Amino acid sequence: MTSAGLAKPTAASPGSAPSEAPLSFRALIAPLEPARFFADYYGRRPLHIPAGAIDKAGRTVTWPQINEIMAMTSIWSDSSLELALNGRSLPPQAYCYEGIDREGRRTLKPDSQRVQELVARGATVVLNYIDTLLPGIRSTAAAVASAAGAPVSVSLFASWHKVQGYHVHFDTQNVFALQIVGRKTWKIYANREQNPARIPGFDSPSVSPEEGEKRKGPLLFEVTLEPGDLLYVPPGFYHQALAETDAAVHVGYGVCHFVVQDFVNLLVRDLPKIPAFREPLAHFDEPEALARQLVEVAEQLRAVVGQPQQAETMRQFLRAKAFEQYAVYNLPHRRPNHRFRLRRAGLLDAAPTPGGPLAAQLAEWARRVELFALSDLQAAFPDRPAAALDEALQDLIRSGALEPV
């Protein structure tokens, strides 16, 4: 059931892509077009997209895969595997033991027996940082990072019938919640925290469950997600979810945008290179001298921030952070398997690109996959000579539609 507060696009046209194909950003939000999504919803208001012709759930994760990665005991810690029951996160001591991680450092590691005992009582299992563990999740996370221009953190939530995992809360991320198994009812509330950030005092852990209940406001809408449904929740909106079936799994792709404070933090690291920022401050008994000195420092800081290279340096930093965790290999071939992405303009605008017929075919293919490696390109066009493919690729790079990652 959907209320008036819920935006809902029209249904997709018949015909589905093969389930083994990567789930691009365009496919994730289909049938809504990316241009409309970013103009009308992203960072602004929640959106429910019902399951359509594309098999979104089947391309992501299965129960055997969940069991398999949970059995990789050496990769889990109390921060990457969490449990929640009756609205609260369980303390690590309830399901962890003190062990040694893969780098030989002491850490709290989940005890599989205690985890399963708590699951038997209804504890929600949360698998964090699974961004690169499974091919279906990895490809979609990379596509979301490319489209949004920020790193993506992926968590999987396995919940059980009518047992509350987390109380009402808000996220600092833009969350794309894709329902995989079962049904889960979400309640989105009207109130929203302004510009939440991963900074103590401005994130959800800084707000107690009791305070969250006071701040959430009236119900904006309620929706029950079926497998393949997508729910987009902008940062700051209070929400909660409850499983309606014996088991319910959803995967949350959280876009972690950097904030202006992050730019300031990076700037501060380099300020000591400037002599003025290493000068001793004036004596506290000389307030006028101290005030003059701080005014001079402020002017120097303004000059530093205004340097043309600062924007380009930050742009390169943001770009690198968005893609640094996604690697592609093509062994036993020894040549680097370079990656390329469809730039934002190419994602939002399907205008013709310059070049010959092969460049046009490559552009159409790139708009479907959005992010690819050389090995993907060669596999998609096996009958084309490598030199011709490279020429078409360079045409699209020169046009600004594609760029190396």
Image (cartoon, helix red, strand yellow):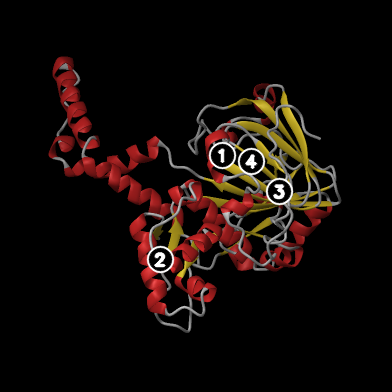
Q: Secondary structure at mark 3?
A: loop
Q: Earlier in the sequence, mark 4 or mark 2?
A: 4
Task: Measure how far apart labels 4 and 2 are at the Cα level.
Answer: 39 Å
Q: Reading the chain from its start, which is encountered first: label 1 or label 2?
A: 1
Badge 4 element: strand
- Name the residue that disc number 2 marks: 356
Instruction: Please name the residue that numbered disc 3 is placed on.
Output: 12
The crowd level at tag 1 (other Cα within 10 Å; few <14, some 14-19, many 20+) is few
Q: Look at mark 4 in the image and give the residue it sits on.
A: 232
Marks 1 and 2 close (CB-CB < 8 Å)? no
Q: Earlier in the sequence, mark 3 or mark 1?
A: 3
Q: Residue 62 placed where, x, y %? A: 73, 63
Q: Is residue 227 left or right of residue 268?
A: right
Mark 4: give few (<14), some (14-19) or many (20+) Cα within 10 Å.
many
Marks 4/3: CA–CA distance: 18 Å
**Mark closer to the chain start, 4 or 3:** 3
Quick check: 312 above or below 196?
below
Give the spatial CA distance, label 3 vs label 2: 32 Å
Give the amino acid at mark 3.
Ala
Determine the residue positioned at 63% across, 47% down. Answer: 29
Mark 3 or 2 closer to N-term? 3
- Disc with the residue nearer the chain's start (4 vs 1): 1
Q: Nearer the viewer, mark 4 or mark 2?
A: 2
Q: Residue furthest bottom?
A: 332
Dot 3 and dot 1 residues touching (CB under 8 Å) = no
Pointer 1: what residue? Answer: 36
